[in-house]
Image: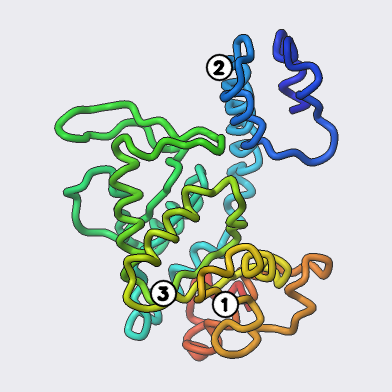
Amino acid sequence: MKEAQKVPGFKNNVEFVSAAEGSLNIELLISLFSSNQIPFADRKVTTLRNLVQEDITKKLSAARRQKFYLHKALLELHRLIEYRETLQGAISLNYDDILDEAYKANDMQVNYYHTPDKVGGLPLLKLHGSFNWTSINTYGKRKQLSIIPLGINKNYLNPPYNFIWGRAFELLVRCDILRIIGCSLNQNDIGLIDLLFKAHLERVDTLEMQIIDFQTQGDWVKNNYGFFPGIVKPKDIEDAPIVGNSILHPANGGNPFKVWLRTKARKMVEDEIPKTKYLKSCL
């Protein structure tokens, strides 16, 4: 928002609703700009969306990305335990390609489900699109592919997003456990909440939803979405606390994703960890 205020004309007609003090919900603000009769609203919204993309891509510098290993370790773990747990696929709300790189690092063929007829590969369902997608071939036509832009009101009905969301629905109906890693499940993700709701209606049993996050976030999810009966808070995952409660509190630092990976690996493949490429970094 501070950068947007420097753009000539951005604050015109929105002087009193474009402050940059404290924390703010940028997706909600973009939606409010779009839904109200503000002169040149499209230009203002585009400015904000471009600044968000610039902010994300700058933070994910090449030097910083080289240090990332948790996504790679996750997939490496699943390769080691595939005889006991079958990974059905991954669902992401992020625009970056960190998870894509993890697939590649583990020699896993990725299937984005840009088309309804493509088979093979492990699903990587990026519900809002990706900065690294350019164009795709759908129904024999080559088309430019845009991300689903920031904002609460999102349109998932056009190709390829209808294929991606449809495949995500199928995975949620058929899987036994959904592990939610670092996703806040806030009200901006109402489309995702609706998708989970629809999947629950079609299931014949309870979907176990493990919250791989801080205890406080697990409590928040349980309190807000308690109508889903299968929510499992961090301290109750795997039928026992994965760590002491203290490390899973934001005030005490620590990374819940890393803690869970380490605990899960030790439980299932402890003797093989030293021979791994990425997983051993979680110790």
Question: Circle 3 sits in a helix, a strand or a loop, which is it?
Answer: helix
Name the residue type under label 2: Asp
Q: Which label lies toward us, 2 or 3?
A: 2
Quadrant hosting residue 91: bottom left
Q: Which residue is drawn at 75% across and 14% down?
A: 11
Pointer 2 or 1: first along the chain: 2
Q: Residue at x 16, y 49 (%)?
A: 117
Residue 25: percent from left, percent from top: 70, 39
Within 10 Å of disc 1 (Cα), the crowding (few <14, some 14-19, many 20+) is many
Within 10 Å of disc 3 (Cα), the crowding (few <14, some 14-19, many 20+) is some
Q: Locate residue 277 relative to residue 21 in the image: left or right.
A: left
Q: Name the residue under label 2.
A: 42
Image quadrant holding the C terminus, namely bottom right
Quadrant hosting residue 239: bottom right
Return the mark for residue 78. 3
Question: Circle 2 sits in a helix, a strand or a loop, which is it?
Answer: helix
Within 10 Å of disc 2 (Cα), the crowding (few <14, some 14-19, many 20+) is few
Pointer 2 or 3: first along the chain: 2
Q: Is residue 275 above or below residue 57?
A: below
Name the residue type under label 3: His
Residue closest to the eye, 188 or 23: 188
Q: Mark 1 points at which residue?
A: 232
Return the mark for residue 61. none
Pointer 1 or 3: first along the chain: 3
Question: Circle 1 sits in a helix, a strand or a loop, which is it?
Answer: strand
Label 1 – label 3 distance at C-alpha: 20 Å
Q: Which label lies toward us, 1 or 3?
A: 1
